[in-house]
Amino acid sequence: MTPTSWRVLLAGALAAGLVGWLMFQASYGSLVQLPTYAAVSAGLMAGFELVLARVVAQKVHGVARGRQMHPIQIARAAALAKASSLAGALLLGLYAGFFTWLLPKRGRLAAADHDLLVAGISGGACLLLVVAALLLERACRTPEPPED
């Protein structure tokens, strides 16, 4: 498995941002308000992955006492990290597209202020998810063998 490329994450975020902007441009009036607690799931997932990254890093480098992690557990954590980083980047782009479309309309549309706040907070939570996923992926790497 190769490490996640920042270019793939950036391209996904930019493409999703364009889609989000176009989607809001085409149908903002017919959409429901963004859910107030949209950022909660991304924030909880980011917190979980940060804790998991710390645990995995300690187990892989032999710092933590107790039972070692099974290699399948580490592989599953790496797969979770890869999926979360891409999903977080796509959602970050989508919320950024919403945010950039809503920013000039603040105060002029009824729900724009609420949606602008939710898009900003959710985008921040998704950015945190991407960072946490990349840290988890890094923690899952096999340590370099010691030099003789």
Image: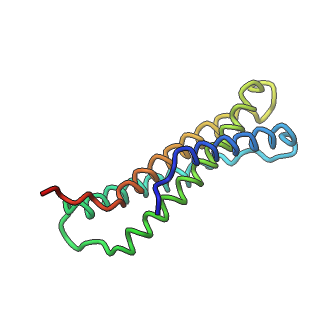
| Image quadrant containing the C terminus | bottom left
Based on the displayed image, in which of its 4 quarters is residue 120 positioned? Answer: top right
> Is residue 96 found left or right of 139 in the rendered image?
right
Residue 33 on image: x %, y %: 75, 44
At 80% from the left edge and 25% from the top edge, which residue is drawn?
108
> Is residue 111 found left or right of 45 in the rendered image?
right
> Is residue 54 found left or right of 81 in the rendered image?
left
Residue 73 on image: x %, y %: 38, 72
Based on the displayed image, in which of its 4 quarters is residue 117 positioned? Answer: top right
Asked if 83 appears above or below 96 in the picture, the reply is below
Asked if 18 appears above or below 44 in the picture, the reply is above
Asked if 30 appears above or below 25 in the picture, the reply is below
Residue furthest front in the image: 148
> Is residue 127 found left or right of 138 in the rendered image?
right
At 40% from the left edge and 51% from the top edge, which residue is drawn?
135
In the foreground, 35 or 86: 86
Residue 136 on image: x %, y %: 40, 56
At 59% from the left edge and 54% from the top edge, which residue is drawn?
87
Residue furthest left in the image: 148
